Image (cartoon, helix red, strand yellow):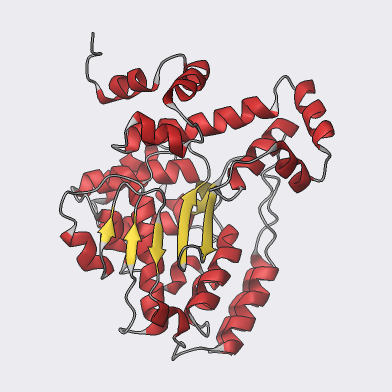
Amino acid sequence: MLDLFRHEIDTFVQMAPEIPDRPRIPCIQAKILNAILNAAQLPEREIELLLAAESLRRSDLRDPHGTLPFAAYLRLFDRVAAAMGRDSFGLDLSSGMGPELVGPAGYIFVASPDLMHAVRALASSVFTIQDATVFEVLTDPAPHVRYRITDDAMTPRRHDVEFSLGYVNHLIRRLLGPVYAPAEVWFEHPGPARPELQEALLGCPVFFDQDRNAIWFRPEDVQRRAPGADPNLVALMQHYIQLLDRPDHSIQTFTEEVRQTLAALPEGRAPTLETVAARLGFSPATLGRRLRAEGTSFRDLLRRKRIEGARRLLTETRLSVLEIAERSGYGETASFTRAFRTVTGESPRAYRLRLSGSPPVP
């Protein structure tokens, strides 16, 4: 088995084409969308039309080294689910996918010695699968993993989020066996009033309209040893990942570098000028001066980041404006409304009404 993997790695390294500098567009492995389309079993003509709407062809997805824009993937996932008429399509699909879907990261996962080694390995290698996302392993207030898309402008995301958490949950079950069950699963987006289907698929209570997308673990599963651990396979796959460079997004401006740094910061604490400057290796004064030279400021970039997140919550959740203001880092609705109007030109309430198609209340 290991000899086969070594042969595949050597072949990949020898045959992989020179990859030119890519434009700064977050991408995902094309084979993931290809697997989703294969599972959907839609007529080929319908698939071609769906792909054509994003200027893609089926052959683009069959390239083993191919990628496609992550935003296009999100839109296509949503359209495929609509064509299938299945609200839970992403979650339904996740339990049928094996570790080969994500390559070395998947094989490391199912060969790890225990749950925490597996999820931490995935968190460190998610860059080999897709951009613009963060997979975090957290222990406070209890052990859990969190999945988030860092660019709040990228929507719709419901099917990707349900697929991603469902897939990780499925890999954990492959790792630990049938004794495993999550304590709870949370989703940020709204869900059905009675989530029996989701709870049956995930094997635990499921909650929607939460402040994060997360799988929460039981203490006994955190401590459980994996019966099929394979340290030789883990070492081989880790070597393979080391051969891959993190993707170069060809950042063109300092403003964009700061924006991406803000997006990648862990949530839960308000980012500060000092924190971001330290991440980038500059003094706060130098960071502020370089942003001013490009016609912006740290305060403006932070406000725009918060309002992008608020726009998504207004669109995708049933949270009140007050709740969204608090999640966006504002202590009260008046300051949140002022900031929202500065960025978008309208109030949060008017924005939500316009997108819902409801007439404004006089």
Residue 11 sits in quarter: bottom right
Residue 255 sits in quarter: top right
Q: Can you say whether 180 is above or below 20 in the image?
A: below
Question: How many numbered marks does the figure carry?
Answer: 0
Where residue 3 appears, x then y in whole percent? 59, 89
Task: Report if residue 23 is visible in the image.
Answer: no
Q: Of 327 and 264, which appears nearest the observer?
A: 327
Q: Can you say whether 346 is above or below 309 in the image?
A: above
Where residue 44 appears, x then y in whole percent? 28, 50
Where residue 161 appears, x then y in whole percent? 38, 53
Identify the residue at horizontal 41%, vertical 38% (top origin): 155
Q: Is residue 123 left or right of residue 16?
A: left
Identify the residue at horizontal 47%, vertical 78% (top origin): 115
Task: Report if residue 149 is visible in the image.
Answer: yes
Q: Is residue 308 left or right of residue 347?
A: right
Q: Can you say whether 141 is above or below 25 in the image?
A: below
Point out the residue furthest to the top here.
362
Residue 358 sits in quarter: top left
Where residue 353 appears, x then y in whole percent? 28, 21
* Quarter placement of the C terminus: top left
Point out the residue furthest to the front here.
331
Q: Can you say whether 183 is above or below 37 in the image?
A: below
Identify the residue at horizontal 70%, vertical 68% (top origin): 243
Identify the residue at horizontal 32%, vertical 37% (top origin): 319
